[in-house]
Amino acid sequence: MRIRARVPDAFAIWALAFGYFAFYVPYSGLSKALSQGFLPGMNGPVSGFTFLPASAVATTLVLLAMAASVGRRGRDGRGPLGPASPSMRWGTLAAGLATAVIIATTTINYTFTGISILFALLLMRGGVLILAPVVDRLWGRRVLPSSWAALGLSLAAIAVATSDVNSYRMTPLAALNIAAYLGGYVVRLNVMTNLAKHHDPDVNRRYFVEETAVAAVALTAMPALAALLLPGPIAGELRAGFTVFLATPAVVPAVLIGLLYGCLYLFGTWIYLDARENTFCIPLNRCSSLLAGVVASYGLCSLLGRRPPSTSELIGVVLIVAALEVLMGATLLARRRAVMAAPRRIVLFVCGGNTSRSPMAQAICNDELARRLDLASRGGAFRRVEAVSAGLTTTPGRSFTPASRAALQRLGLVPHDHVTREVTRDLVAQAEAVFCMTEDQRLALVGRFPEATAKIRRLDAGGDIPDPSGQDEETHHRLAVQLRDLIRAHLPAFAG
């Protein structure tokens, strides 16, 4: 049976990956163009440390708006962030500070003279892939052969990219910046894996708000403190960025860079927060930005006449993409095997004609299961637990009544392709629980299938759920809400 309730959610992470890609292209291209003086009307290059303050302030405003928006959902009673929520945790405080370092160093990485967009991406993305199995070993976690293979490909990519010594110029400052970027990810990914990446969206929402709020403040505070307290040329460039640079025309693209990063941060962070393994989410995130770097590099080449990527850089990109494919392929194959090996469990809902109450309960139950269980896919073929429905007195070939369909849509569900069917002995035998809508239906089922008496019960133990046939859409909506509440009460018994 094919289930379509909330099917779009199965592809949500791919939509996030596209959003991340779409914002990363102009972000990386504009960062390189501004720092190297490629933009029309510019008098010359602008140091990354000079435009970082304006960019950081713009990103800070976007992140604070995101944190406030998600936090407001909690205060409205739909999340964990209301007045009774616990205070900021040390873990998310550390992750937020690390995230601020990642944001700042990412922008700076694209501004060094002699380092192309793709070369910087290869060092950053390859570095994170190399770190992943190393960190796992340090924490005593098992590292799969696919991860070691990806590590080898990542090392090969960096070796190929760095072998062409005439295509880049690596300075000590650039190397230190890359190291700070990778160090930020060591902290962030470990904290995120321990405190979030949960199947409960409220847990991920709380983490997002905490990390984002800390990162937003730290992103502007850290360069401001450095400009105020530290000596040296870098601090001088930061001071200029907070003062005289703000009066120049170059502040406009600098602010745009910050706004673009704020948007791509949203997409990238929710990819990481997906409940699936890091070996799936990290490669997906990394691959999106690598492809964006290729597009941005050729965009600068065609629009501004800049040097195209070198052969060694393109070979490095191919090797990194191959590493990502190895990780994602191994993860998906292992997940599919595990899910297919798990026994299929069925919950059966029964009413009279199988056009309103029972198929509505089926759709609602599958939606709740999809929210709570670790599913490889929202499709029925991959469910460990699946709700189905049938009727006692059905007319073959019918579907949802229009009012039932509308009621499900008001709950935010996409009604599945439903065709009425009669309840059968085989169907009852397969089900681990059978829920009827009325006491008469329960007695009728017990009479037909006495061997299943123990698992046949009313959905509402306190009374019958009346047939809504012929009633208006509001009645059907109230029925849908009632069914959802009853199903949520029963869910712990069969969703484990």
Image (spheres, grey):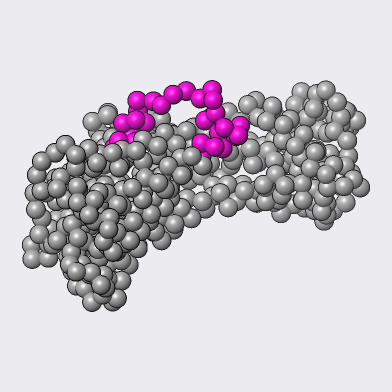
Residue at 82 percent across and 53 percent down: it is: 402
Q: Is residue 442 left or right of residue 198?
A: right
Residue 312 occupies which quadrant of the picture? bottom left
Question: Where residue 374 sits: x, y (%)?
Answer: 52, 38
- Which of these two is toward me, 353 or 372? 372
Question: Where residue 6 sits: x, y (%)?
Answer: 62, 48
* 281 vs 35: above or below: above
Question: Where residue 73 sits: x, y (%)?
Answer: 56, 37
Residue at 36 percent across and 50 percent down: it is: 58
Give the magenta-colored segment's residue range: 70-98
- Which of these two is toward me, 23 or 387? 23
Asked if residue 302 is among those painted magenta in the image, a careful observer would answer no
Q: How many marks?
A: 0
Our reading of the magenta stretch's main secondary structure is helix
Question: Where residue 228 sits: x, y (%)?
Answer: 19, 39
Residue at 39 percent across and 59 percent down: it is: 23
Q: Is residue 56 left or right of residue 431?
A: left
Can residue 213 be seen?
A: yes
For the C terminus, the quadrant is top right
Residue at 83 percent across and 23 percent down: it is: 462
- Which of these two is toward me, 445 or 416? 416
Q: Is residue 44 left or right of residue 480?
A: left
* 385 vs 246: above or below: above
Can residue 342 be seen?
A: no
